[in-house]
Image (spheres, rainbow, N blue to C red):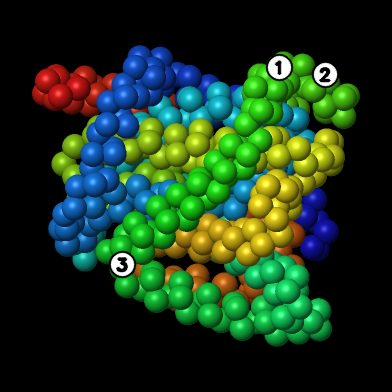
Amino acid sequence: MLQTIETVNSAVNNFIWGVPAMICIIGVGLYLSIRMKFIQIWKFPYAIRTTIGRIFRKREASDGAMTPFQAVCTALAATVGTGNIAGVAGAIAIGGPGAIFWMWVSAALGMCTKFCEVTLAVHFREHNKEGELVGGPMYYIKNGLGKNLQWLAVAFSAFGVLTVFGTGNATQVNTITTAIDSALLNFNLISEASVGTVNLVLGIVIAGLVALVLLGGVKRIGRVTERLVPFMALLYIVLALGVVILNVTRVPAVLYSIVYGAFNPTAVTGGLVGTFFMSMKKGVSRGIFSNEAGLGTGSIAHACADTQKPVKQGFFGIFEVFVDTILICTLTALVILCSGVGVNYGTAAGAELTIQGFTSAYGNWISIFTAVAMCCFAFSTIIGWGLYGARCIEFLFSSKVIKPFMVVYSLVAILGATIELGLLWSIAETFNGLMAIPNLIALFLLGGTVAKLVKEYFATEGSEA
């Protein structure tokens, strides 16, 4: 039975995250970019100026809401995760340096896709019975499209609930325990025989911390993420920049290998990555996994923002993709490629390749930092996805099921710390891809609505734009 499930899931997964997914996500991103006149490019300075200005504006959100900055931090909490460390390394190993170029391409289009998702989420959001702001793909499908397409909202929410336990929780906890185990073993603080016990204790502690944050409601989630996300992101950026500066003479050659390798990967990898399509596929898929543009999940957090201007909050979507993919993922790639560590092209790789890049520049002590960074990244992802799952299950049933869901979601951390997750991760990844289908359909159909909102916004805000 288990073998049958694994076979069926593998077939569905390969289809969803293969050529069809890339065509749909890139296609919708290109369509929206054209409809918005490539707003992510011609209004990029305005987007950065607007978002940075609101980051440093100190104010309290109204009841049942987050500040705009807390909303983007919660969205970034879910997207800036272990994938920024391990996923980029895997893309380079299988797709060559050129995969990073295609990651940039997907991010450039993804900025517009995320902009549209956030704008629609704020425009079509509602207040639930507790007075909290709720929104996201299920709500802009419900309120923006006809009754004949309401099943898309149900499908998105159902896939979302099925996804969060694996993608958002168990696999992230497993990453935390693996990082801590590695650090403790390296310093001979524990033995191999005691790893199982340590992991059980870690799982219980993590479950308690997750429950403490999530059961505190949307305001507590916002307060935690607005502190955790900037800290972990800035620390990672500073240390990654240090590696690049120490190897600055290699930067021109690395940038050349990224651009040239995007179209001729064989020449850059010595024939170990032999196809242009493989390089493009790995780069595009890494970009999609990293910033979630097209999946719609990030807009759920943005819908909680205490703002009356959907388009203005939409610019945080552009900012979010820029920080996650263009900045953090690119720095990870430069850490690997500039440090000169050996990349075994054509063979799967993960966080260990990124860690080697750091240790080559700073020494073995940096393994402590990478363990802390991966723990922070993974914990923030658990918090962000907890909110997503709560909103999805609330849409399917009612707000009464949120707290029971939060308790169950928190307890899954214990399973994630103590069991093997191979099949669970694969199934969760499949449901994650299935979430994108109803969202992309809605974005395509509601592109005109976003274009109208943008036109109206700049008609009234023209003087400051």
Q: Amino acid at mark 3?
A: Arg
Question: Badges 2 and 1: C-beta atoms under 8 Å apart?
Answer: yes
Residue at the right extreme of this rendering: 271
Reading the image, the residue beneath label 3 is 220
Q: Position of residue 405 (x, y in %)?
A: 44, 70
> Is residue 24 rendered to the left or right of residue 118?
right
Examine the rendered structure and indicate whether residue 24 appears above or below residue 287.
above
Residue 379 visible somewhere in the drawing: yes
Reading the image, the residue beneath label 1 is 260
Mark toward the start of the polypeptide (2 vs 1): 1
Q: Amino acid at mark 1?
A: Tyr
Question: Quadrant of the rendered structure where residue 365 is?
Answer: bottom right
Q: Position of residue 124 (x, y in %)?
A: 26, 41
Q: Quadrant of the C terminus?
A: top left
Residue 386 visible somewhere in the drawing: no
Which element type, helix, strand or loop, lies under badge 3?
A: helix
Examine the rendered structure and indicate whether residue 288 appears above or below residue 62.
above
Examine the rendered structure and indicate whether residue 416 appears above or below residue 10.
below
Residue 401 or 353: which is nearer the viewer? 353
Q: Position of residue 229 (x, y in %)?
A: 42, 55
Which element type, helix, strand or loop, lies under badge 2?
A: helix
Q: Which mark is residue 76?
A: none
Total tally of numbered discs in the picture:
3
Residue 96 or 150: which is nearer the viewer? 96
> Is residue 382 rendered to the left or right of residue 70?
right
Reading the image, the residue beneath label 2 is 267
Disc 3 versus disc 2: nearer the observer: 2
The residue located at (38%, 36%) in the rendering is: 319
The residue located at (66%, 28%) in the rendering is: 249
Q: Amino acid at mark 2?
A: Ala
